[in-house]
Image (tube, rainbow, N blue to C red):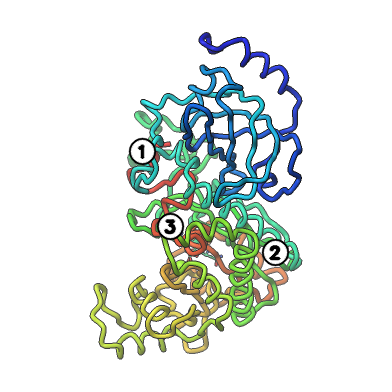
Amino acid sequence: MFSHFSKFAVSITKSMEHTRRNRIVDLLKSREFGSEVMVKGWVRTKRGNKNITFISLNDGSVIHHIQVVAEVARFDEEVLKLVTTGSCIAVRGTLVESMGQGQHVEIQAKEIEILGTADPETYPLQKKGHSLEFLRDIAHLRPRTNTFGAVLRIRHAMAYAIHKYFNDHGFFYIHAPIITGSDAEGAGAMFRVTTLDDRNPPLLPDGQVDYSQDFFGKETKLTVSGQLEAELGAMALSLVYTFGPTFRAENSNTPRHLAEFWMIEPEMAFYDITDNMDLAEDFLKYLMQYALDYCIDDLEFLTKMYDNELIDRLKGVINSKFERLSYTQAVEILIASGQTWEFPVAWGSDLQAEHERYLVEKHFGRPVILTDYPRDIKAFYMKQNPDGTTVRGMDVLFPRIGEIIGGSQREENLEALMNRIHEMNIPEKDVWWYLDTRKFGTAPHAGFGLGFERLILFVTGMANIRDVIPFPRSPKNAAF
Ligand code: 4AD
Ligand code: MG
């Protein structure tokens, strides 16, 4: 493979076959000094002198690196030369107590094998301290940085904790379809899914594209939400949730919007809006606590590097009672605040991030749940209040993020729902299946949607949503 390698390297390959790899996270916790260990990972730095080489190795199992100490005389010079930043190596050696600062253990190397070289002239992560913008352009390599390692491990832990929370609370995981034939939710512009020839699509006599000849025999899109399907599940299994990718084709180029993001949508039969708020608050606090319990090394790193209030902010959420008030009360507070806004505040218009953040960060100093929004700015399915102007929607607002959760009690009354559908010109033929749940054994129910990347933004303290998903999709950006 590497012609300039000595036979030495080859014989090591053989001797290392079938040897179990030790994860660095386990070794760093180990006190079994003197034991034989084997690690594989990517070199972060190499330094030393003519007698001794120190290699800092990371395998992604933990933010910390393990130090490998190699006596130069014991190794083939050619092999050590190929140990460069970014290269991948396997090391066998003895676990020893470290005399160096900042680590308890290190490995005295006996054998080193180069699994993959990384040319120092061209390896893009040769130096430390690249900007997050630069790293976005090398999304294929950024998982190898400390920052993205931390973000990806936290992302994983949060996904696991979400499933654990719901499983422990008697919820069932429902898989909503990603390709959908319905646009009832109205949550945003949709991406079309088609196999028609884009240069020569079949046309109807009126010049419109004839989707009856498309793959599904009708026009189909990528889903904006799994809620409507989750409702079908809740009307059978009582407590369900979805957790899947959702897509919105809006041209929102903000640090809080993606065109492809993941959403968690619990849906609960026999819940009203208060139960819904209680669940949302308990769920979010559980996730913050889980992060503190299981991701503390990564959180400490992110706190040190990016956001010195991060850990305190997570604790602050856990220890606070979320403030609950109506949209109408919030509007009164915002108008009375005397602030100047980029977007003016008036009853009936949607609140912007600046308003949401003012309420959370300046006025209340803790998370806020707003309820009872004007019905004209919310979806057709929200339960209508007797006042005829508001609906039982709820948004959970977080510091730095603004809206992290959107949800509602659902309109379970068939007549009220039909009236709303007609008012909003939603064709009955598109939602007949949804209406059936109100026709047959309808029940009060409620649910909400948590934007997974907004959660990860909050938990990691990162500033841009493009930095909390491995391969972000946003307007004019689907590079990888
Ligand atoms: O408020 P939204 O649009 O609500 C729904 O889709 C409902 N069907 C949820 C439900 O009741 N089951 O979206 C829910 C959450 C938002 O609060 C936000 O956290 C996130 O999804 N979100 C986005 N995250 C990233 N990029 C975008 N473009 C987002 N749009 C919404
Ligand atoms: Mg919303």
The answer to which of marks 3 and 1 sits earlier in the sequence is 1
Name the residue beneath numbered marker 2. Answer: 166
- Position of 154 with respect to 183 (left or right) is right
> Which quadrant is the C terminus positioned in?
top left
Q: Are marks 1 and 2 in contact (CB under 8 Å)?
A: no
Which secondary structure lies at badge 1? loop
Image height of 292 relative to 138, above or below: below
Name the residue beneath numbered marker 1. Answer: 205
The crowd level at tag 1 (other Cα within 10 Å; few <14, some 14-19, many 20+) is: few
Q: Position of residue 93 (x, y in %)?
A: 68, 32
- Position of 90 with respect to 239 (left or right) is left
- Number of the label disc, if any, that sits on residue 305: 3
Q: Nearer the viewer, residue 369 or 223?
A: 369
x 52%, y 18%: residue: 77
Q: CA distance from mark 3 to mark 1?
A: 62 Å
Q: Look at label 3 and name its amino acid.
A: Met
Q: Nearer the viewer, residue 153 or 231?
A: 153
Q: CA distance from mark 3 to mark 2?
A: 33 Å
Q: Mark 3 or mark 2, which is nearer to you? A: 3
The crowd level at tag 2 (other Cα within 10 Å; few <14, some 14-19, many 20+) is: some
Q: Quadrant of residue 166?
A: bottom right
